[in-house]
């Protein structure tokens, strides 16, 4: 039996979470280092997954399959395509930075409970590793029921990270802050649980349909895709549309897509900056990934039927998120609304049904994760120094902390997709892919680029430039060694992938081709007017009828 690489990659942080939680209360520093080492080891395994993946090979690779709940056709079945492998690498890459940036985030909770048996530091880092494990297995699961279990299970540790370890920098005081953290955590949980319940009904419906068509129910995605392609798996148009909607609603909440997005600004605003990165750069990517893997793969006709509505909602997300980001006074909520706009671009690319659009959407998931992590983590360092999330409480930071201001600028420029930085590549592909099939949608989406430049540059101008307007800013320290170690690799990746994204595109493109094949779509041919080119001797200058000038 070959080594179960995918299981090992997901199991390592799960085991690390248990071990971190079990560290004695007095050994808080040991718990931090254990969590960091486990996350780095997981990154090594995820890198091996990426290196062992053969872009020219079969669709799902490094597969594992074992009986789990045999009576209901449920199997423990794993496998990755290029999209899953890239997102596993993104998850494993970001978690060490999340841990490094959140090194002291549990200290405030420790101070609130100095004599409690509960070990906040151990719990904080254990929960981060638990989320990582569940996200990794979600990207690798090829059994629909197995995916659903971890799609829902990751909500539990995220709930405690938001509600129990939320941001203490609240303008209204600690008591009001505690209420807001609780509200944000409950809202996050209820929204996503509601979507999960709708999806559960659709998962059961899919099993019933497969049993009727195949004689035996199955949740295996490769088997369902094969049966769908051969015509063995059949369902009425109404049934397919209902099942599509059941899956899509859950993924749209997780993504999040307007109007199911309202939990995200609360969750990101009340969470600490590292946990906010975990939400939008890691957990939310499961929603957009699942749209590609499950919605388009299992329900191609319904996906085509729903495309006009989904594109409309995606465009609303792009413009609505950007417009609200422009008017924000809270730094973290600004980044949250910017992310809603970016997820609109991702979903636009997914449902453009072109290779450029879906390839760009996949790259957007990866590059948005890196750029948002860079911007939000630097914002977290800034907020921890000043003790405020309000933009008006800053000004002139670049005079006293130039390294912090420089990192903040790079993260912001990446967020607005400046050419030369990684997100530009993905956003350009999404817009080109959308325009080639839906030109009106592509034109409207470009307004999001203009608004992004507005909210990012205004944010930088109000916080970093000009004179030092507040006494609290005058003695603000610059980034420390640990903080530079967190930010510098992210900035380097944004630069490197901005000029050389080819290694990632080579892994992603074959998976995109398979997805387009599932929905039976091909890239539209460019439409050009048919005209004979004028020859040199056909030219007649104005005002001359012939002669030597012809």
Image (cartoon, rainbow, N blue to C red):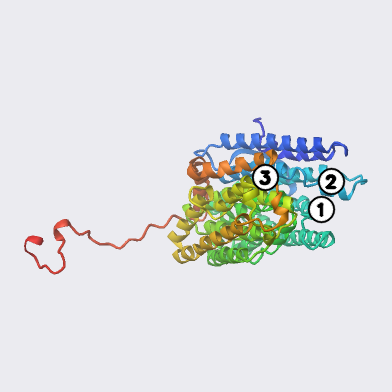
| Quarter where residue 167 is shown | bottom right
Q: Indicate the position of residue 471 as horizontal and vertical percent values.
A: 72, 55
Q: Quadrant of the C terminus?
A: bottom left
Residue behind mark 3: 478
Q: Is residue 449 left or right of residue 244?
A: left
Q: Secondary structure at mark 3?
A: loop
In the orientation shown, which residue stands out farthest toward the right? 115
Look at discs 3 and 1 and give the one toward the viewer.
Answer: 3
Residue at image location 54% in from the left, 54% down from the top: 231
Instruction: Measuring from the top left, give residue 242's x and y in whole percent.
Output: 63, 64
Residue 234: tell me if it is visible: no
The quadrant in which residue 328 appears is bottom right
Residue drawn at 62 percent across, 39 percent down: 63
Q: Which residue is mark 1?
A: 164
Q: Earlier in the sequence, mark 3 or mark 1?
A: 1
Residue 438 shows in the view: yes
| Among numbered discs 1 and 2, the one appearing first in the sequence | 2
In contact (CB < 8 Å): disc 1 and disc 2: yes
For the residue pair 221 and 30, the one nearer the viewer reads as: 30
Q: In whole angstroms, how far apart are the C-alphas of marks 3 and 2?
A: 28 Å
The local secondary structure at tag 1 comes to: helix
Of 135 and 404, nearer the camera is: 404
Determine which residue is flagged by label 2: 120
């Amino acid at each position: 039996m070959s080594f179960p690489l995918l299981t090992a990659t997901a199991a390592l942080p799960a085991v690390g979470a248990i071990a971190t939680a079990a560290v004695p209360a007095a050994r808080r520093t040991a718990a931090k280092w254990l969590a960091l080492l486990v996350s780095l080891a997981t990154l090594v395994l995820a890198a091996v997954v990426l290196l062992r993946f053969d872009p020219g090979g079969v669709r799902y690779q490094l597969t594992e399959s074992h009986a789990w709940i045999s009576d209901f056709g449920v199997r423990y079945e794993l496998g990755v395509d290029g999209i899953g492998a890239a997102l596993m690498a993104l998850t494993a890459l970001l978690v060490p930075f999340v841990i490094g940036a959140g090194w002291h985030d549990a200290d405030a909770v420790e101070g609130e409970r100095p004599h409690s048996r509960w070990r906040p530091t151990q719990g904080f880092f254990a929960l981060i590793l638990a989320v990582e494990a569940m996200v990794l297995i979600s990207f690798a699961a090829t059994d629909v029921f197995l995916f659903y279990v971890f799609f829902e299970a990751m909500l539990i540790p995220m709930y405690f990270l938001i509600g129990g370890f939320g941001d203490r920098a609240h303008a209204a005081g600690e008591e009001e802050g505690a209420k807001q953290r609780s509200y944000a955590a409950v809202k996050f949980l209820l929204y996503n649980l509601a979507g999960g319940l709708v999806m559960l009904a659709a998962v059961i419906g899919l099993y019933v349909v497969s049993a009727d068509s195949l004689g035996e129910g199955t949740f295996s995605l490769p088997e369902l895709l094969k049966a769908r392609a051969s015509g063995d798996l059949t369902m009425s148009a109404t049934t397919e549309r209902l099942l599509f909607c059941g899956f899509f609603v859950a993924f749209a909440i997780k993504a999040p897509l307007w109007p199911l997005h309202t939990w995200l600004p609360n969750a990101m605003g009340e969470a600490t900056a590292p946990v906010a990165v975990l939400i939008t750069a890691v957990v939310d990517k499961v929603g957009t990934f699942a749209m590609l893997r499950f919605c388009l793969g299992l329900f191609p006709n319904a996906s085509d039927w729903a495309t006009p509505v989904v594109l409309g909602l995606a465009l609303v997300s792009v413009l609505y998120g950007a417009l609200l980001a422009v008017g924000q006074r809270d730094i973290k909520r600004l980044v949250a609304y910017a992310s809603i706009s970016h997820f609109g671009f991702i979903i636009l690319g997914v449902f453009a049904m072109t290779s450029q659009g879906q390839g760009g959407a996949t790259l957007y998931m990866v590059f948005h994760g890196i750029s948002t992590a860079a911007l939000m983590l630097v914002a977290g360092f800034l907020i921890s120094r000043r003790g405020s999330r309000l933009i008006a409480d800053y000004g002139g930071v670049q005079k006293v902390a130039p390294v912090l201001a420089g990192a903040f600028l790079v993260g912001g420029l990446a967020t607005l997709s400046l050419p030369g930085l990684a997100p530009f590549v993905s956003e350009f592909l999404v817009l080109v892919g959308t325009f080639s099939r839906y030109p009106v949608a592509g034109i409207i989406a470009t307004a999001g680029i203009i608004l992004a430049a507005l909210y990012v540059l205004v944010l930088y101008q109000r916080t970093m430039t000009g004179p030092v307007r507040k006494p609290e800013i005058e003695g603000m320290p610059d980034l420390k060694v640990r903080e530079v170690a967190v930010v510098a690799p992210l900035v380097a990746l944004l630069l490197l992938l901005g000029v050389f994204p080819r290694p990632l595109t080579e892994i992603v493109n074959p998976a995109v081709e398979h997805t387009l094949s599932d929905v039976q779509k091909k890239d539209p041919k460019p439409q050009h007017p048919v005209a004979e080119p004028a020859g040199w001797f056909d030219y007649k200058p104005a005002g001359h009828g012939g002669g030597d000038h012809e």
